[in-house]
Structures are given as structure tokens and as C-alpha cells.
Amino acid sequence: MTNLQTTIEQAWNDKSLLKDLNVQKEIREVIEHIDKGRLRTAEPTSDGWQVNEWVKKAVVMYFPIQGMKTIELGPFEFHDKMELKKNYAELGVRVVPHAVARYGAFVAPGVIMMPSYINIGAYVGAGTMVDTWATVGSCAQIGANVHLSGGVGIGGVLEPLQASPVIIEDNAFIGSRCIVVEGIRIEKEAVLGANVVLTASTKIIDVSGEEPVEFKGYIPSRSVVIPGTYTKTFPAGDYQVPCALIIGKRKESTDKKTSLNDALRDHSVAV
């Protein structure tokens, strides 16, 4: 991997190298490693998460070295630079029409893809449900046994290019029509109610105690979150601005399935 990283960094700094066939070969090798789950754009460590910038750079440079071509699937036709993933039975993945995953995305055994979309560079862990019209953006990292409910939008890092991918850790539940973008991290077993919007600038306020506690950029593990607003003063007056409210925690004393049901019922969270 060290040799691959060196080539990728050199090509990133000198884009004329993208014309070199050996460089193109090594970029494609990186994408193959991502597709098979051997490389990730971000990976968990003992201290949190490590973003592998050079892997992300390889994904970005894969686009200009690929030519456009027509892909025909029965009555459907696409015209793109990317192949689609194949051999789902061999991978142990259930794919409901019209779900689409691009080559260069890793989809683990036990994943269920309802009509949805998974972009290149993404990682989707075992047992995760990608529900109807949910989208997993480029290089997003989705853990095991996550539920991405209908219409969830998980942002990517390529358009525009951003530093950190969105990370959804194991056993999280993301409610219908939630939007999670700009490198937000959802820690293990957190529950997002319907329509929660999280960006890098979104205030995340824990209101479950006597005094509010503010977070930014991440949702703490086992948190139960709903959409809210706070008052902000502008030159034209005071207006309500969206935020995310942590209203409680999932219980550690129960298993994850029961804990999820309890969290939704106890806090009357819409999903």
C-alpha cells in the first residue's frame, strides 16, 4: 500500500502524471481495494477515526482517467464513467429494483438495498438497511446494523471536495428524510428522528439535563435526537434557526433492538 500511496500523492501534485498508463493502473488498483473493502477513505482506530486522504484522492482522480460509455440493463440505459457493482448473490447482498451501487463502493454481506443509491468510495457495513430513496454519498462510512430510513441523504465528499466523510457508526438509526452532510459523525447506537438536518455548522444541543450542553460536528453515542430551533438575532430582527436537540439516551440495559424501540416510544420520536 505504501507504493500505491506514493504514486497517488505524486499524481495529485502533478496532474500530468494521469496520462501515464502505470499511474492509471495504480489508481484503478486502489479503487479495486476500496470495492473489496481492503481500503477505506476513513477507518476506526483506538483513538477515534482516521481519514485516509490519499485514498480519497485516488477516488477523485479515478474520474478523469475513465472514459464515458453506454451501459444497457434491459430497457434501461446509462451513459457514465463508472461501472455498476455486480455479483450481489456472491456478495451476500439483497438488492431490490431499482437500487444502484457504483463499482468502487464496498457493500458488506447482509446489507439490504431497497431502491436506493450508493456512490463510489462509500463503505456500508454488514446487516445495514439502506431504505427506499436513501442515498449514501461518495466516501461516506456507514457501520454495521445501521438503518438508513426512507429518503435519508448521507452527503459525499467529492462535489464539492471536502476534508472528512460523513461517518455513521454501528447500530445507529437514521429516521426518515434526515440529512447528514459535511463530515458529521453519528456515534454508535444514536437515534435520529425524522427530518433532523446536520451540517458542519448545525448546533447540537443536549436538553435532557437542567442546563443545555452544546456539541458541534458529532452526535454522542446512544443519543436520541429530534429537530428543533433556537432564536438568533439578525440585523432585520430575531428569527428561528434550525438545530438538533438531544432529548435523551438509549438504555444500555437492553439489547439494541429493544433499546431502539424503547427510545422511539419513550421519547415520542417520529421516524
Image (cartoon, grey):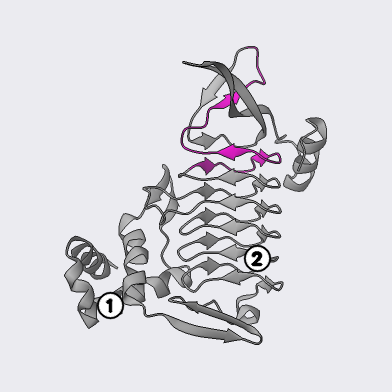
Amino acid on which the number 1 mark rests in the picture: Gln
Name the residue beneath numbered marker 2. 111
Which quarter of the image is occupied by the N terminus?
A: bottom left
Does the segment drawn in magenta span residue 172? no
Residue, x 66% and y 85% (percent of image)? 75
Left or right: where does residue 58 sit relative to residue 33? left
Amino acid type for the residue under numbered disc 2: Val
Q: Does 197 lie within the magenta span?
A: yes
Instruction: Verify CB contact (< 8 Å) between mark 2 and mark 1.
Output: no
Q: Where residue 238 sits in the image (x, y, percent)?
A: 56, 15
State the mark number for residue 207.
Answer: none
Secondary structure, mark 1, is helix
Pinpoint residue 228: horizontal percent, then vertical percent: 65, 27
- Which quarter of the picture shows residue 25? bottom left
Q: Which residue range is magenta in the image?
A: 184-210
- Picture disc at residue 24: 1
Residue with the most extreme top position: 210
